[in-house]
Image: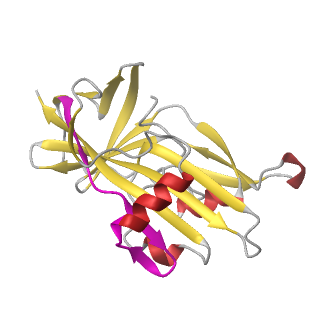
Amino acid sequence: MKRILTIIAAAVLLQSCEKDSTTQYSGTYNSKVLEVSPVKLYTSKGEVTDAAIVSSFVKRYQRTASLFSSDGNQKAEGRLKIDFLAGNSAQVTEAQGYEARSVIVKGSDIYLQAYTPSVRMNTEEESFFDKLVVYAPLSAVTTMVPFTTGFTSKTEFKHCLYANKSGDAIRFPMLSYLYVSVGANKLVIKMREMQQFNNLLVSDASKKLNDGDTLAVQQSYLVLNRQ
């Protein structure tokens, strides 16, 4: 599940998987279009709106040439298909194959949760970025691990795909980001980038950043329509 599945587990407490019994989904939904927004740039002081500065930052630091896409609508036929089945279950199909998942509905949000738990070894940097995204697994338990492992903690979780119902369509929020942190002595530069993973940026992203942090993000939505 290459472009949708990624590192999203947050260091959160175990949460119950409540179901909205009043909402049921059925039928097959196929991807039609990817709605892509312009790249935005944030520092601890707020959003940087100068397009030239945004472009310069991206060109200077991005390591993947295709990290950000041209904004607007892009064709996405056959990229993702969801077959909603009986018993709050669904089959998720991508080019790489298919997987069965449970369906959990909370208001207009849809969680397609894996049946089998996964494990992620965490670092402090990863835990920091978890604060910048909206969605976290519904079921996750984090425990500390020995310092000698090179990690700070271990999270056992059930991976979720996140979507939102909008009219007759289902929209999967996708997030590409480039994060750069410059140390006080300006000799240490930390960078992380990820292309189109399934999540949504928090509305107060600047408040989550520290001095020396810069975050370039591009929000998009993979739109699935019912057949």
- The image's colouring method is secondary structure
In which image quadrant can residue 79 be found? top left
At x 20% / y 28%, what residue is drawn?
30
Q: Is residue 39 visible?
A: yes
Q: Quadrant of the C terminus?
A: top left
User: Does the magenta run of residues contain 74?
Assistant: no
Q: Residue furthest bottom?
A: 45
Q: Quadrant of the N terminus?
A: top left
**Residue 60 percent coordinates (x, y):** 54, 55
In which image quadrant can residue 73 be found? top left
In which image quadrant can residue 89 be found? top left
At x 41% / y 63%, what residue is drawn?
54
Magenta residues span: 29-51
**Residue 28 percent coordinates (x, y):** 18, 26
Q: Is residue 9 visible?
A: no
As rendered, which of 168 and 64 lies closer to the eye? 64
Task: Assign the magenta stretch its main secondary structure.
Answer: strand
User: Does the magenta run of residues contain 49?
Assistant: yes
Q: How many marks?
A: 0
Q: Could you tell whether 128 is left or right of 88 in the image?
A: right
Task: Answer above or below: position of 5 versus 221.
Answer: above
At x 47% / y 53%, what residue is drawn?
177
**Residue 138 percent coordinates (x, y):** 46, 51
At x 43% / y 44%, what residue is drawn?
197
As rendered, which of 11 and 217 lies closer to the eye? 217
Q: Could you tell whether 185 is left or right of 63 in the image?
A: right
As rendered, which of 36 and 6 lies closer to the eye? 36
**Residue 175 percent coordinates (x, y):** 40, 50
